[in-house]
Image: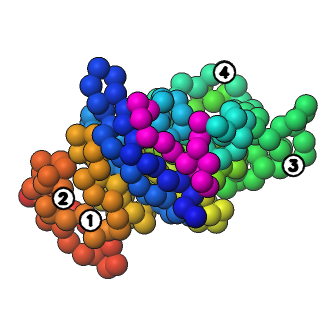
Amino acid sequence: MDLIHVDRLNFKYNRYILKNISFDLTHGCFVSLLGINGAGKSTLLKNLVRILRPESGAVYINGEDIRGIGHKEMAKRIAYVSQHNIPIKNTVYDTILIGRLPHIGRDATHSDYGHVEYLIRKLGLEAFAMRDANTLSGGEFQKVILARALAQEPKILLLDEPTSSLDINNQAAVMRLVREYCEEKRISVIVSIHDINLALRYSDKFLLLKDGAIYDYGDASVITRQSIREVYQLDVEVLNHGNKKIIILN
């Protein structure tokens, strides 16, 4: 059984933003969501995590319609990191601990604290653990928000443009950390991203959105000169470099 099954999803405000979206996501798969601004990427992620409710269609996790899943159980299955996260005056440690709330009963346990400390080490945040999160740089804080999401121990991680405000070094670092951690834990990932070459470096599959509909979905074979031209209105060369593709703007 697929981990996620999206069945003929439609969503609108005053017009349709998503049109007849259907796809499946298997366990441990890393998917990049590609398309221009306004294609519907953020809206799709918000429908998957139930922030927005579709006009029609459904989303299933392990065969269960998400509309029937309770909030606490939903948070154990899906973690979502939005584009814009504002730090509050709270330590990095306590910010990450918030991610344990779906698992905490009356009080946090040694296991909860141990999980937070593991993530702090895994993401290289030891030097910042007791600092206020609102004193961190953008790249440092992005790692904290990612750690908070991973603290939920989700089966599915949704990331909305996690690298958009980062420099090149931190873009690669965040994508590499997500890839490595999710391979280790067999977490499935859907990440909305603008940098196609970064997506090609770390992703198993690619979902291309155009005008709110799926243009194509599959492995790197769907990234072609023709698909980039039609989705992005860009003329590029698509080259093979080692066992990966890269695109070069003409």
What residue is rendered at 32% in x and 68% in y?
Answer: 220
List the residue tagged with mark 3. 111
List the residue tagged with mark 1. 222
Circles 3, 1 touching at the beta carbon (< 8 Å): no
- In this view, the residue in front, 213 or 39, is 213
Question: Is residue 65 located in the magenta-colored stretch of the structure?
Answer: yes
Quadrant in which residue 78 is drawn: top right
Q: Secondary structure at mark 4?
A: loop
List the residue tagged with mark 4. 89
Quadrant in which residue 204 is drawn: bottom left
Q: Amino acid at mark 2?
A: Ser
The disc label shown at residue 227, or none: 2
Q: Secondary structure at mark 2?
A: helix
x then y, percent, for residue 234: 12, 51
What residue is rendered at 47% in x and 35% in y?
Answer: 46
Question: Is residue 136 located in the magenta-colored stretch of the structure?
Answer: no
Near mark 2 (Cα within 10 A), the count class, few <14, some 14-19 or many ≥20, is some
Q: Amino acid at mark 4?
A: Lys
Near mark 1 (Cα within 10 A), the count class, few <14, some 14-19 or many ≥20, is some
Is residue 116 at all visible to an observer of this figure? yes
Q: Amino acid at mark 1?
A: Val
Circles 1, 2 touching at the beta carbon (< 8 Å): yes
The answer for how far apart the CA atoms under marks 3 and 4 are is 25 Å
Position of the N terminus, as image quadrant, is: bottom right
x then y, percent, for residue 151: 70, 45
Q: Amino acid at mark 3?
A: Ser
Q: Earlier in the sequence, mark 1 or mark 2?
A: 1
